[in-house]
Image (tube, rainbow, N blue to C red):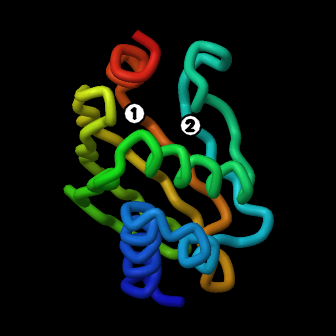
Amino acid sequence: MNTEQNKQLVLDFWASFHNADVEKAFSYLDDNVQWRAMGVKGELPVSGIMDKNGIGDLIKTVKEMMPNGLELKTLSLTAEDNRVANEVESYGELTNGKVYNNLYHFFIEISNGKIVKIKEYMDTIHVKEIFIG
């Protein structure tokens, strides 16, 4: 795949995440994908590494907590070779009335037309304030 196709793959994955379409999201992921959310391990439930099933569980959990979905707005998208750097702003209204609005940087690697690795950098303090209290 070329860099434009890689960027489109990432955008399509985020659209399926927003729509809570696990089956569609899985179609963009390699069976051995790893998603690593940066943060001090143990401080946040989402810190550490998720496999494909963990990503599916995350999508389902987000949908339960945010029935209108988690909006993922791409702020910038840069690709080189098999890597895509993606700055994203999220927005979601939780069932408890809180608003989750975070900024992220995702570093995504692609192989054979599938996402094989996601590294997520985010405002961990905001995550803790909104989801843990």
Q: Secondary structure at mark 1?
A: strand
Separation (CA) of disc 2 from disc 1? 8 Å
Mark 1, residue position: 122
Q: Amino acid at mark 1?
A: Met
Percent position of residue 4, x then y = 37, 85
Q: Would you call the spot at circle 1 few (<14 residues within 10 Å), some (14-19), or many (20 or more)?
A: some
Q: Residue furthest right?
A: 32
Q: Against 121, is 124 above or below? A: above
Query: In the rendered view, does 39 fall on the left or right side of 68?
Result: right
Q: Please give the name of the residue rendered at 44% of the width and 71% of the height, measured from the top-left corner.
A: 16
Q: Which mark is residue 76?
A: none
C-beta proximity under 8 Å, tags 2 and 1: yes
Pinpoint residue 98: horizontal percent, then vertical percent: 25, 26
Q: Residue 78: x and y, percent?
A: 33, 66
- Residue 37: give its label: 2
Residue 103 against residue 74 in the figure, above or below? above
In the depicted view, which residue is nearer to us: 19 or 41?
19
Residue displayed at 55% across by 78% down: 24
User: How many numbered marks, from 0 up?
Assistant: 2
Question: In terms of image quadrants, where is residue 82?
Answer: bottom right
Q: Is residue 44 above or below residue 47?
A: above
Front position in the image: 38 or 133: 133
Q: Position of residue 62 (x, y in %)?
A: 46, 46
Residue 114 relative to residue 1: left or right: right
Locate the N terminus by quadrant. Answer: bottom right
